[in-house]
Image: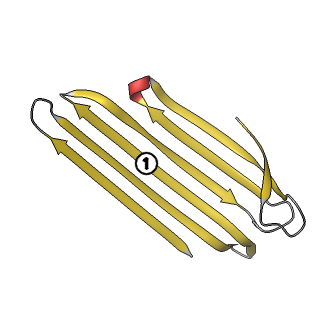
Amino acid sequence: MWQRSLTLALEQQGGNTELVSFSGALSAEYAGDLHFGSKTLNDSEVKLALSHKRGELSDALYQHNGSASFLLDIMAQQKFPPFFLSYWSYDSTTTLNSRIELGGGGKIPLWRRSLHKCCLSVGG
């Protein structure tokens, strides 16, 4: 079943200093069986999140950043379920124009029939 969320915020103040700030976030999450034609991936999860913030104080940019993330957790309750993730972010106020992180790995139970899992990931 898909779950979605959208958040938007705008702030504007006047006076001795002018402040204008905007932020937004969008997320979507799916948990259940994924179907790809005749293939079914039981008990899988997909998560996507996006965010952006921008703020100006007296016409000077003090905040301009955002991020996007994606997670695919295939057959989450198996003995060694694989997962893949990616993350992209930027922050022009700190000269971070773009950072991309990719990874993948597997999870193993910490003990028999445990819901707690230990993750081993490889990425860069």
Mark 1 residue crowding within 10 angstroms, few (<14) / some (14–19) / many (20+): some
Residue at the image position 53 percent from the left and 72 percent from the top = 2
Q: Residue furthest left?
A: 15
Q: Position of residue 121 (x, y in %)?
A: 77, 45
Residue 70's place in the image compared with 61, above or below, is below
- Quarter of the C terminus within the rendering: top right
Q: Position of residue 98 (x, y in %)?
A: 50, 31
Which residue has dot 1 on it? 51
Left or right for 26, reference 118:
left
Residue 124's place in the image compared with 8, above or below, is above
Left or right for 99, reference 92:
right
Q: Residue furthest right?
A: 112
Q: Position of residue 113 (x, y in %)?
A: 86, 70
Query: How many discs appear?
Result: 1
Give the colour scheme shown.
secondary structure
Residue 53's place in the image compared with 113, above or below, is above
Residue 93 location, quadrant: top left
Residue at the image position 58 percent from the left and 36 percent from the top = 100
Kindly identify the amino acid type of the residue bearing the numbered disc 1. Answer: Ser
- Quarter of the N terminus within the rendering: bottom right
Residue at the image position 75 percent from the left and 65 percent from the top = 76
Mark 1 falls on what kind of element?
strand
Residue 31 location, quadrant: bottom right
Residue at the image position 46 percent from the left and 51 percent from the top = 50
Q: Position of residue 62 (x, y in %)?
A: 31, 29
Q: In this orientation, which residue lies closer to the viewer: 75 or 34? A: 75
Residue 43 location, quadrant: bottom right
Left or right for 1, reference 73:
left
